[in-house]
Image: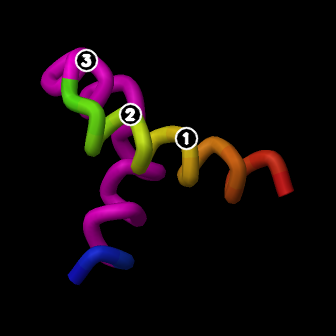
Amino acid sequence: MLDTFVSDLGNKPLDMRRLLPYSPLCRTLMNKTDEVNEQ
């Protein structure tokens, strides 16, 4: 389930940032997603 959620973040990173800009959990997930994208 978490993998699917992270995949959704990868598909819609701007949407997630717009919807949950102050969420620590979202920020952590986005950081992990960015790290994966950079590799």
Q: Look at the image and give the residue range highlighted in magenta.
A: 4-22
Tell whether position 8 is magenta. yes
Question: Residue at (27%, 65%) from the top-left corner?
Answer: 5
Q: Residue furthest right?
A: 39
Please tell me which of labels 3 and 1 falls first in the chain. Answer: 3
Please tell me which of labels 2 and 3 falls first in the chain. Answer: 3
Question: Residue at (37%, 77%) from the top-left corner?
Answer: 3
Type of the residue with mark 3:
Pro
Q: CA distance from mark 2 to mark 3?
A: 7 Å
Residue tagged 2: 27
CB within 8 Å, label 2 to label 3: no
> 15 or 17: nearer the eye?
17
CB within 8 Å, label 1 to label 2: yes
Question: Residue at (26%, 28%) from the top-left corner?
Answer: 15
Would you call the spot at circle 1 few (<14 residues within 10 Å), some (14-19), or many (20 or more)?
A: few
Colour mapping used in the image: rainbow
> 22 or 11: nearer the eye?
22
Dividing the picture into quarters, in which one does residue 23 lie?
top left
Q: Residue 31: give x, y in percent of width and height.
A: 55, 41
User: Which corner quadrant holds the N terminus?
Assistant: bottom left
Mark sitting on residue 31: 1
Q: Residue 2: give x, y in percent of width and height.
A: 28, 75
* Secondary structure under the numbered disc 3 in the rendered image: loop
> Looking at the picture, does residue 15 appear above or below residue 26?
above
Q: CA distance from mark 3 to mark 1?
A: 13 Å
Would you call the spot at circle 2 few (<14 residues within 10 Å), some (14-19), or many (20 or more)?
A: some
Residue tagged 3: 21
Type of the residue with mark 1:
Asn
* Secondary structure under the numbered disc 1 in the rendered image: helix
Type of the residue with mark 2:
Arg
